[in-house]
């Protein structure tokens, strides 16, 4: 009987270890999936931002082609007139690609980064969506100049939260997102609030479960907020709380400085 108990204990240990390794592997897959998902979203936003400058470029070249075919003597004059506009459109498109490359560059090591600058990069990627929803995003910090940590994790969290809020705003005039970052004795505290009307799911904590989405779009995967929770708790050794306010939703994130 003792031998049976020993072997049973060993078997249970091996089984538990395998399950733990499988769970870790699944979490890694989900984190990578969130990275590719957010990349897809960013590419979609950049595509939208490129529509206007591409239209402008097409119009300019069509006009120059028409001048070349009908009034060649005016080609140099018209070309000189169009050069500033063509340069501006190309510069704008280059900047959007540079912002994308900067945001998704491999930042796997801890480093000092300024959170407001990271959020500024996110705003550039989501620029067209921010303009369409008429949202003001304000970032404030208290007792903090920089964060020492994984910038790509912080950026991924902020990208998901901001993009989720943008999906919920209507066309009212006072759409706002407020982000307040504070350094305490042993934690970084991040308070994220919007006035997009709040989350209707009850209990509200269910939004951290996979395949649960508060968005009206039925094609939404419901993976964003669960990934945020995993990144905060598993990668940054922190805690995240959510609640509805009078006007919207509030996320309170506390990250261990030594994580």
Image (spheres, rainbow, N blue to C red):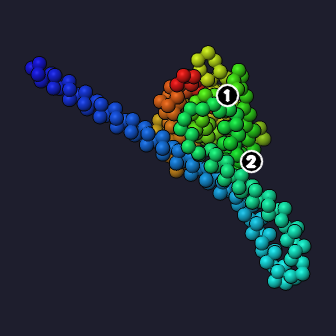
State the SS at label 1. Answer: loop
Q: Which residue is mark 2?
A: 131
* 18 w.r.t. 182: above or below: below
Q: Residue furthest left?
A: 1
Q: Which mark is residue 146?
A: 1
State the SS at label 2. Answer: helix
Q: Position of residue 182 (x, y in %)?
A: 67, 23
Residue located 59% across and 45% down the image? 105
Q: Quadrant of residue 29?
A: top left
Residue located 71% across and 20% down the image? 143
Q: Quadrant of the N terminus?
A: top left
- Which of disc 1 and disc 2 is earlier in sequence? 2
Look at the image and tell me whether residue 234 can be seen: yes
From the viewer's perspective, tell me whether residue 25 is left or right of residue 66. left
Q: Position of residue 193 (x, y in %)?
A: 66, 31
Residue located 59% across and 46% down the image? 104
Gap between marks 2 and 1 measured at Cα: 28 Å
Q: Position of residue 117 (x, y in %)?
A: 70, 37
């Amino acid at each position: 009987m003792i031998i049976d108990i020993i072997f049973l204990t060993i078997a249970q240990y091996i089984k538990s270890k395998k399950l733990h390794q499988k769970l870790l592997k699944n979490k890694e897959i989900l984190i990578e999936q969130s990275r590719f998902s957010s990349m897809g979203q960013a590419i979609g936003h950049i595509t939208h931002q490129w529509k206007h400058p591409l239209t402008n470029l097409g119009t300019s070249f069509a006009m120059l082609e028409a001048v070349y075919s009908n009034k060649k003597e005016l080609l140099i004059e018209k070309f000189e007139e169009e050069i500033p506009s063509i340069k501006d459109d190309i510069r704008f498109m280059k900047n959007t690609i540079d912002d994308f490359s900067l945001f998704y560059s491999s930042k796997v090591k801890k480093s000092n980064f300024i959170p407001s600058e990271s959020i500024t990069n996110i705003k550039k990627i989501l620029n067209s969506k921010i303009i369409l929803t008429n949202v003001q995003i304000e970032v404030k910090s208290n007792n903090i100049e920089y964060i020492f940590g994984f910038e790509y994790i912080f950026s991924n969290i902020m990208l998901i939260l901001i993009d989720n809020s943008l999906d919920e705003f209507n066309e009212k005039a006072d759409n706002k997102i407020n982000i307040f970052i504070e350094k305490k004795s042993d934690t970084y505290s991040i308070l994220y609030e919007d006035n997009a009307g709040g989350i209707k799911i009850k209990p509200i904590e269910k939004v951290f479960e996979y395949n649960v989405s508060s968005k009206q779009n039925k094609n939404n995967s419901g993976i964003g907020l669960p990934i945020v929770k995993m990144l905060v708790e598993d990668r940054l050794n922190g805690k995240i709380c959510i609640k509805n306010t009078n006007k919207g939703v509030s996320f309170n994130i506390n990250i261990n400085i030594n994580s």
